[in-house]
Image: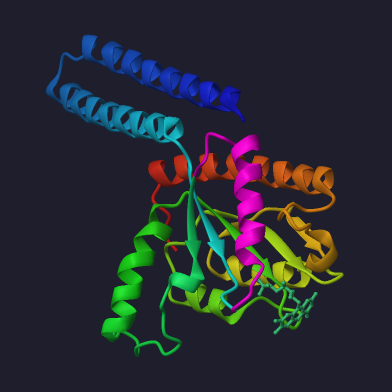
Amino acid sequence: MPDTTATATTTDADTTATTTDADTTATTTDADTTATATTTDADTTDAAATAATTDAAATAAAAALRVAVIVGSVREGRLGPTVTDWFLKTAGTHAPDLHLDVIDLAGVDLPLAMPDWGGAPTPQAAAALAAVSPRLARADAFVVVTPEYNHSFPAALKNLIDWHREQWQAKPVGFVSYGGLGGGLRAVEQLRLVFAELHAVTMRDSVSLHGPWSGIGPDGEPRDTAVSEGAAKGMLGQLHWWARALRTARTQHPYGA
Ligand SMILES: Cc1cc2nc3c(=O)[nH]c(=O)nc-3n(C[C@H](O)[C@H](O)[C@H](O)COP(=O)(O)O)c2cc1C
């Protein structure tokens, strides 16, 4: 994956810090008057702040990217875990530097009923939120594994999305979908609208497994492995770029929505 990008980012950061230090030194040498000294102090403070921000951005750029992989179906006998296992294996091959955290909604006990504005969640909701919300908040990016139900996506997925807000903001979202002939694409297109409302960025390319009954073999592998792996590789490449770029941007300028 893009090691080159990491190097370029670090180099840019170093260059900015060096230029700022040089400017500060030159100004200090000229400082004869109090007014100039005050300006110089301000410049030095600015320079220190800039350097600190730049350091934080460089550190953020170097850390492993965390991706929450959300399993969107919860019904008995679901194919969701099989599709997810294939995706995890594929991601391990094509994007081994990503840190993947699987959030299976079958294990997330969020109720449908939400509290009033400003109200406290029920103990059941509070316990579920305590388990899942920090994992969403920590994620630099998301991959949503979703089937298509009645030309849309499962209700459990919408419930998780609606219980959260800033956890999604200024982060990229990729999709792995499956279904009948449409390969879950109608679910994905609807999810794009929902995530846009939440200030998230959806990846142009997605993985779409057409007809789970014929598209996934008994070993859990898609029958058209080459096509599916190619799609996964493309989506992961875009997700990687956006995850790194937006994490750096959030570090330098906290997103205010
Ligand atoms: C309630 C329901 C509605 C469905 N509606 C559609 C649909 O509109 N389009 C489609 O391609 N497949 C549809 N399917 C087929 C599912 O996409 C397919 O069974 C898939 O495996 C479901 O995901 P899951 O096994 O993880 O629950 C539907 C399945 C269910 C259970």
Q: Position of residue 15 (x, y in %)?
A: 44, 18
**Which residue is at the front of the view, 67 or 223?**
223
> Which quadrant, please, contains the N terminus?
top right
**Which residue is at the front of the view, 251 or 15?**
251
> In percent of the image, x 67 and y 67: which residue is there?
79
Q: Position of residue 45 (x, y in %)?
A: 22, 30
Is 78 part of what is drawn in magenta?
yes
Q: Position of residue 72 (x, y in %)?
A: 58, 69
Q: Position of residue 218 (x, y in %)?
A: 75, 58
> Which quadrant, please, contains the C terminus?
bottom left
> In percent of the image, x 81 and y 68: which residue is there?
213
> In percent of the image, x 38 and y 65: which residue is there?
132
Q: Quadrant of ligand 1?
A: bottom right
Residue 187 vertical placement versus 237 (above, below): below
Q: Which residues are magenta?
A: 76-99
Residue 21 vertical placement versus 252 (above, below): above
Residue 94 is drawn in which quadrant?
A: top right
148 left or right, relative to 154: right
How would you classify the magenta stretch by its main secondary structure? helix
Residue 201 vertical placement versus 59 (above, below): below
> In percent of the image, x 44 and y 52: which residue is there?
139
